[in-house]
Amino acid sequence: MFFYILGIILIIIDQVTKLLITDKLDLGQSIPVIDGILHFTYVRNPGIAFGLFPKMNIIIIILSIVTIFLLFSIYRKTNSGNLWIRTALIFIVSGAAGNLLDRIQYNVVIDFIDFRVWPVFNLADAFIVIGVVILFIIIFFTKEREKDAPDPFSIRAD
């Protein structure tokens, strides 16, 4: 239950921040938070990462729904003792859902976090990256376990 609540909270935080940006800034407007380092810049991204594949919103929506469904299915089948894996999956699903809601509502994704050295992004994007980084760490940096220890990637059969 905790992870479902976490997922809902992440989606709400993402959507509220986007609502605040669209309410307080004009499209293209930028305000410094830490001058020269971090700005809030209101942009609309019609594509996916780095603006790739613009004008393919319907296909991106369908792929997003399929991806969310598959990741959520993996989450539900993942052993409940694998807290880090479940956390990572919830972050990825929540980020994907946050951006999906934008695509359905606006036909674009609202982005606003601007470090000036990287394309503008949003919290949903950050959640996806956090989840992927957690999975990467689990996969590549967990120590070898004894043969009798439970597999951290075990999936229970339903």
Image (cartoon, grey):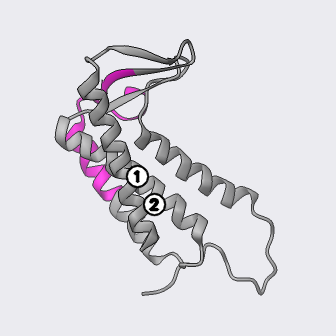
The magenta segment is 41-67
**Other residues around mark 1 within 10 Å, as few (<14) / some (14–19) / many (≥20):** many
- The quadrant the N terminus occupies is bottom left
CB within 8 Å, label 1 to label 2: yes
Residue matched to label 1: 10
Q: Position of residue 57 (x, y in %)?
A: 23, 38
Residue 109 magenta-highlighted: no
Q: Position of residue 17 (x, y in %)?
A: 35, 37
| Vertical comparison of 108 with 13: above or below | above
| Vertical comparison of 146 with 19: above or below | below
Image point 27% across, 23% down: which residue? 24
Q: Is residue 53 visible?
A: no
Residue matched to label 2: 90
Image point 40% across, 59% down: which residue? 7
Task: Name the secondary structure under disc 1.
Answer: helix
Disc ID at residue 94: none
Image quadrant where residue 45 sits = top left
